[in-house]
Amino acid sequence: MTKSALQIARAAYQPKLPKALKGSVKVEEGAPTQSVADQEAIKALFPNTYGMPLVKFVEGEATEYPAINVGVILSGGQAPGGHNVISGLFDGIKTLNKDSRLYGFILGPGGLVDHNYKELTADIIDEYRNTGGFDIIGSGRTKLEKEEQFEKGLEIIKELGINALVIIGGDDSNTNACVLAEYYAAKKCGVQVIGCPKTIDGDLKNEMIETSFGFDTACKVYSEVIGNIQRDCNSSRKYWHFIKLMGRSASHIALECALQTQPNICIVSEEVEANNMSLDDVVTYIAQAVANRAANGNNFGTVLIPEGLIEFIPAMKKLIAELNDLLAANNEFAMIKKSAQREWVISKLSEENAAIYASLPEGVARQLTLDRDPHGNVQVSLIDTEKLLSDMVAVKLAQWKEEGKFVGKFAAQHHFFGYEGRCAAPSNYDADYCYALGYTASMLIANGKTGYMSSVRNTTAPAAEWIAGGVPITMMMNMERRHGEMKPVIQKALVKLDGAPFKAFAAKRDEWALETAYVYPGPIQYFGPTEVCDQPTKTLTLEQAK
């Protein structure tokens, strides 16, 4: 395999570890825990793994451990740093006992069910240290939720003599990990299950999980490109760039990138919902900023848009819900001529939703009715929200021009940054954080824990001062309606409008909207002064108030 100069140099990087993990460790247990909500329901579903204490690792006496066999699974979408979680896990179990073995299940949880695996030896691990991607074993989106899957998994676990499984994933994958831990504990199978917090979206966090891994790197990648676009925008001075960013359920990525690059506008979905804004309100807000800049002779700017915005606009949410029900109940829609479909939909909708649907550009209206996922729901990520907004802004500005309220020119460019950030070479922060998460998982296994998520905190301090431990997954759970029934799931962390990151943004956004206050972060730096190379996200720095 041909390697780039950066890959060769990165292979030699030794991730930093918290001081407590550098020698022998012992467990310090905290108070019993309870779920964030629906305590009785969660306790009833997880009688064997509910109410366990928080765990913290501190320096301990030298202990001899027996060899352990561990299985590892990468689940869901990719996030920078996954390979370092596996490297940390490998080094951790080998430190405990050099005869310990690590097995990787291929292409996600499906690999466990289908008995598709490979042993991860030192020579394989060394090829992947500090690299981006999940290609060491691949990832997949199979959900582990059925008894027959648990039993099929158990067959290969017993065959390989595996003592513990580590599932590296987001909120859904870690919910599945908890269900699996409960099942194996109830049956007294002697198989531990540990989770690791992964998602670039940044919505898997709470007081014990400061950030999900990959968020730092992905935001730095997007911010570099946004900075490049802003430099171009400020050079030619003739375009408004509408930039959609990943984050269906939460706007953490858009907010972090705004704090790093200072665009003219950043829409935060959670604020749109809290203020009960209509689509027209959002369009008017952008159009007004365009008009204000034009009045100063600036016919250019940047707008950041979270991918899930449409679902946070209350009126659009109602329209989508009615469309889902209407199309699920009517097979005749597919038989109607394309040219007549729009009118048919308008005739069937309630008056309020029909008016909103009729106001949408034809392309977007079609996306709302045609592209459904297997559950019959709109595929929000396929909606070109950035084009929808710029088209509607253009219509409003043309109207204002006739009324003498707009004196400038408006031309738009569109971008969607998503996959570009998911497999980037991890930043020093993510390389260190992920390695520590994997190493911590090995210590949770050594100390007999199951149903825990690996937790590394205090990460805005130097790595030596980081606090490693574990948090019971049930502590993060609540009950939510999924596909018509109530299910236990890890509660998603949305942008808090009273939180420090949003407040810092809100204090500056009016100034950024009018001025050209762009910041150009440049590419991720891996070598050089610590203030350039080891910076955590602005979100984390503000949340930790450091």
Image (cartoon, helix red, strand yellow):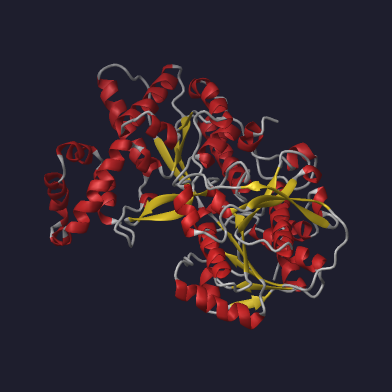
Give the residue displayed 38% in from the left and 22% down from the top. Answer: 291
Which image quarter: residue 21?
Answer: bottom right
Image coordinates of residue 537 in percent, x first then y, are: 64, 39
Residue 173 seen in render: yes
Residue 139 seen in render: no
Give the residue displayed 28% in from the left and 31% down from the top. Answer: 395
Q: Quadrant of the N terminus?
A: bottom right
Up/down of 36 relative to 284, above or below? below
Image coordinates of residue 299 in percent, x first then y, are: 44, 26
Image coordinates of residue 35 in percent, x first then y, are: 53, 48
Give the residue displayed 58% in from the left and 39% down from the top. Answer: 228
Viewer-side residue, 187 vs 357 = 187
Residue 23 left/right relative to 134: right
Residue 130 left/right relative to 76: right
Residue 36 left/right relative to 127: left
Image coordinates of residue 202 in percent, x first then y, are: 55, 45
Up/down of 266 relative to 425, above or below? above
Give the residue displayed 60% in from the left and 60% down from the top. Answer: 451
Which image quarter: residue 522?
Answer: top right
Up/down of 214 relative to 518, above or below? below
Furthest residue in direction right, as rendered: 62
How many numbered marks are there?
0
Viewer-side residue, 280 vs 229 = 280
Residue 60 left/right relative to 255: right
Q: In which quarter of the image is the C terminus?
A: top right
Viewer-side residue, 432 vs 531 = 432
Up/down of 358 relative to 395, above or below? below
Furthest residue in direction bottom, as rendered: 159
